[in-house]
Amino acid sequence: MKTFITCAALAALQLVSPAAQAQAKEQFFPLLVYRTGPYSPNGTPWANGKQDYIKLINSRDGGVNGVKLTFEECETGYATDKGVECYERLKGKGASLFDPQATGITFALTDKVPADKIPLITLGYGLSASADGGVFAWNFPLMGSYWTAADILIQHLGKKEGGLDKLKGKKIALVYHDSPFGKEPIPLLDERQKMHGFELVKIPVTAPGVEQKSAWLQVRQARPDYVLLWGWGVMNSTALKEAQATGYPREKMYGVWWSGAEPDVKDVGEGAKGYNALNLNTSGTSPKVIQDILKHVHAKGQGTGPKDEVGSVLYTRGLVIQALGVEAVRRAQERFGKGKVMTGAQVRWGLENLALDDQKLAALGLTGVIRPISTSCTDHQGSTWARVHTWDGSKWGFSSDWYQADEQIIRPMVKVAADRYATEKKLTRRTPAECQS
């Protein structure tokens, strides 16, 4: 009789699909990664930070209000076609949020996600115009875009020269990854060029960027006052080595926040001394969230990567991205039901209603890691601040206070670009009523 009941119970369980059973208990996070290829030195710590944060929430907190977090990685190699394949494969497994981890993949998915009702977090990357949530209803370039990055860099150079007016007659070279990622800051730099009268020299570098001799020959010939580096992966360390070889001062080089991490400089070491880059987050092991990961994840032998990587620039950024995704789920639960698995549409509402002030950041152990962030239906960015840090030959250290991008310049540009996109795609701006749904 016992055997019969057990078999019947098993048979009943088999009537419920594994996916349905998982959906009832687990919030699934698809993780697009690139642990292989020329961008893997940068993509790997980013991916490890995301995984470790999920493990922390499960280990320390038991999930989000009792809902366990699960994940599955899919290797893209930073290739757009593979990224789309990963998206198509994972979206049906209960995915309610994607971090494409590449601007090219973001461009490809932006047309897909409205039909699938799955939001994209593109923290510090993606389409700058997607800060406009009235048109880009499913894109979230949280904490900054390439336009805010370019704007802050020009502000910083102006400050170094004694005022933005002192940039007149100066020459600024943009050495950029010849891809959607590298081209994104150009409209903002063109606008600032008109305003301040500096000369902008645009020097593209073919991906992945291992061959840059011709680019740096152009730099040597142009003799710019400053070089802005818009690189990723192996392109960054190669650029620094070429700058050293051609004698271009590293202290006059300023990278975007994807060109200022440990993998970019460690192989160059002293040769990169004085190089500057933007940063959206702090690094190091002192923040409470990092200490919690060391205690609740790595000390238990559950760390995704090496322990000495924990707290590095890109590891921490991956952690921050995942933390904001988790907080979007938590915020959504406050409206749609604590202890429930959230859908993509519900998580979008959570992303549009983030309100992480100093007190909430402290509760998450993120004090000092990022600035407060607050989003809305129309503002999908939530924060436009960054700092400059400088490589001293062995470690990064902040060399500026926080800068805020000039919204008087950027907001009209975002509106024009978003309206153009809406016209091309035959989209209608969301109404206030739609924002509340």
Image (tube, grey):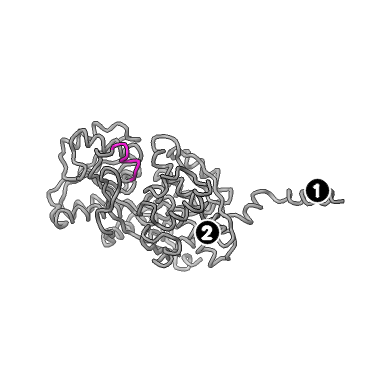
Number of the front mark, 1 or 2: 1
Residue 436 shown left or right of residue 184 in the figure: right
* Residue at 14% from the left image edge and 48% from the top image edge: 170
Residue hosting label 1: 7
Check if residue 158 falls in the magenta segment.
no
Give the structural element (helix, strand or loop) at label 2. helix
* Residue at 38% from the left image edge and 55% from the top image edge: 286
Position of residue 89 relative to residue 437, above or below, is: above
Residue 430 shown left or right of residue 269 in the figure: right
Percent coordinates x, y for residue 231 in the rendering: 31, 42
Locate residue 244: give its quadrant.
top left
Residue hosting label 2: 345
Q: Amino acid under label 1?
A: Cys
Classify mark 1: residues with Cα within 10 Å, few (<14), some (14-19) or many (20+): few
Residue 354 shown left or right of residue 262 in the figure: right
Q: Is residue 115 visible?
A: no
Position of residue 400 relative to residue 231, above or below, is: below
Percent coordinates x, y for residue 13 in the rendering: 73, 51
Distance CA(mark 1)–CA(mark 2): 39 Å
**For the magenta stretch, what is the residue range?**
261-268
Check if residue 262 falls in the magenta segment.
yes
Percent coordinates x, y for residue 164 in the rendering: 17, 56
Q: Which mark is residue 214?
A: none
Classify mark 2: residues with Cα within 10 Å, few (<14), some (14-19) or many (20+): some
Give the structural element (helix, strand or loop) at label 1. helix
